């Protein structure tokens, strides 16, 4: 009971910290970086649904992120659809495309699935890069409108944009929390632990894997839509392997298969990268070995490592208490 209360206190503390951040750090640049971090967090949660809870590593996640961004960008710049209808339609378009790809990709397993989705991700990159008449190619897509007012609420200032992205992130994290603690979440974990055993228990693994893939692409679509509306310029690089590597790094460093991992890993790496901007050309050399060490020595990332320390400490206290009782 006390452990549960401690978790709630920690969660409430960080929620309050996020809400008060614009007051504590009113600098527009810091607000921009934090809002961008929240967008990446949403994308990483999507990757975590597939990689963390059914054990399938989708290397096309950056591609789906780009589809969401470009869908929104094209709807707002080349059609008569308004900002908010486009904002809703873009994640739906991403999910539909992701579902069609998932129907094929989920016929493969393990490393074959990873290789297949890697190829899909590269095909998405090539389509964006070479289809200049639609996407603008290497020149990029410009002219994406700024966030309009939401009723009486103005979204023209860095602070209002920060809160807009923050509340959407809260909503997406809450959905992930409810999913993981539902019957569907337990089913996904059962598939991750042993797909053969799950099948023997009568679980439809195909249906549940497709559902998780759909949710993953929906999260990527939401993140991509937010990114496009926030940055207002898109280029093919947002679907590149570099972005995929970044998302995977955020997830593994924070803790794959955990609810807090995407938040911890993303904020830690993003702010570390900002601090070490002079080493941007060598980021692969820095984060590559770091990722390898974490995979070897702490497969569940920072959150898993900290949780393990608390469990060991609690177990040690119980053992000490039992020994004291025996002595008495």
Image (spheres, grey):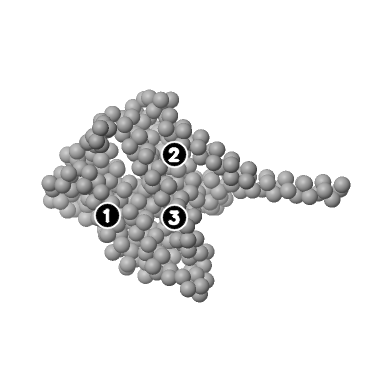
- Discs 3, 1 touching: Cβ within 8 Å: no
Residue 179 bears which disc, if any? Answer: 3
x and y percentages locating residue 213 in the rendered image: 37, 60
Name the residue: 12% across, 46% down: 80
Q: Is residue 29 left or right of residue 20?
A: left
Name the residue: 33% across, 64% down: 102
The secondary structure type at the circle numbered 2 is: helix
**Residue sitting at the far front:** 152
Sequence order check: which comes first, mark 3 or mark 1? 1
x and y percentages locating residue 31 in the rendered image: 36, 31
Residue 28 bears which disc, if any? Answer: none
The secondary structure type at the circle numbered 1 is: helix
The secondary structure type at the circle numbered 3 is: helix
Q: Is residue 257 above or below residue 18?
A: below
Instruction: Kindly report the distance in space between the C-alpha atoms of the residues bearing marks 2 and 3.
Output: 23 Å
Q: Is residue 106 above or below residue 129?
A: below
Name the residue: 54% across, 38% down: 10
x and y percentages locating residue 146 in the rendered image: 22, 36
Mark 2 highlights which residue? Answer: 267
Residue 92 bears which disc, if any? Answer: 1
Name the residue: 48% across, 49% down: 259
């Amino acid at each position: 009971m006390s452990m549960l209360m401690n978790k709630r206190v920690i969660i409430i503390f960080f929620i309050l910290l996020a809400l008060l951040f614009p007051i504590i750090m009113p600098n527009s640049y810091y607000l921009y970086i934090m809002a961008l971090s929240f967008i990446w967090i949403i994308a990483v949660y999507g990757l975590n649904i597939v990689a963390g809870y059914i054990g399938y590593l989708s290397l096309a996640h950056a591609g789906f992120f780009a589809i969401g961004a470009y869908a929104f960008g094209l709807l707002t710049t080349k059609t008569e659809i308004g900002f908010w209808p486009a904002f809703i339609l873009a994640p739906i378009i991403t999910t539909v495309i992701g579902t069609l790809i998932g129907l094929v990709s989920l016929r493969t397993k393990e490393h074959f699935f990873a290789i297949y989705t890697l190829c899909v991700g590269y095909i998405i990159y090539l389509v964006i890069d070479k289809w200049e008449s639609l996407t603008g190619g290497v020149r990029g897509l410009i002219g994406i409108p700024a966030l309009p007012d939401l009723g009486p609420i103005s979204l023209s200032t860095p602070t209002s944009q920060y809160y807009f992205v923050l509340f959407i992130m809260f909503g997406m994290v809450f959905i992930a929390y409810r999913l993981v603690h539902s019957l569907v979440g337990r089913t996904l974990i059962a598939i991750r632990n042993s797909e053969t055993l799950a099948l023997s228990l009568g679980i439809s693994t195909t249906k549940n894997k497709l559902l998780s893939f759909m949710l993953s692409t929906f999260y990527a679509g939401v993140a991509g839509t937010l990114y496009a509306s926030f940055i207002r310029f898109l280029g093919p690089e947002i679907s590149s392997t570099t972005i995929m590597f970044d998302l995977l790094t955020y997830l593994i460093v924070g803790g794959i298969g955990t609810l807090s991992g995407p938040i911890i890993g993303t904020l830690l790496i993003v702010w570390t990268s900002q601090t070490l901007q002079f080493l941007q050309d060598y980021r692969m050399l820095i984060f590559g070995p770091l990722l390898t060490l974490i995979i070897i020595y702490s497969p569940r990332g920072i959150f898993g490592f900290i949780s393990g320390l608390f469990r060991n400490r609690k177990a040690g206290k119980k053992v000490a208490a039992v020994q004291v009782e025996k002595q008495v």
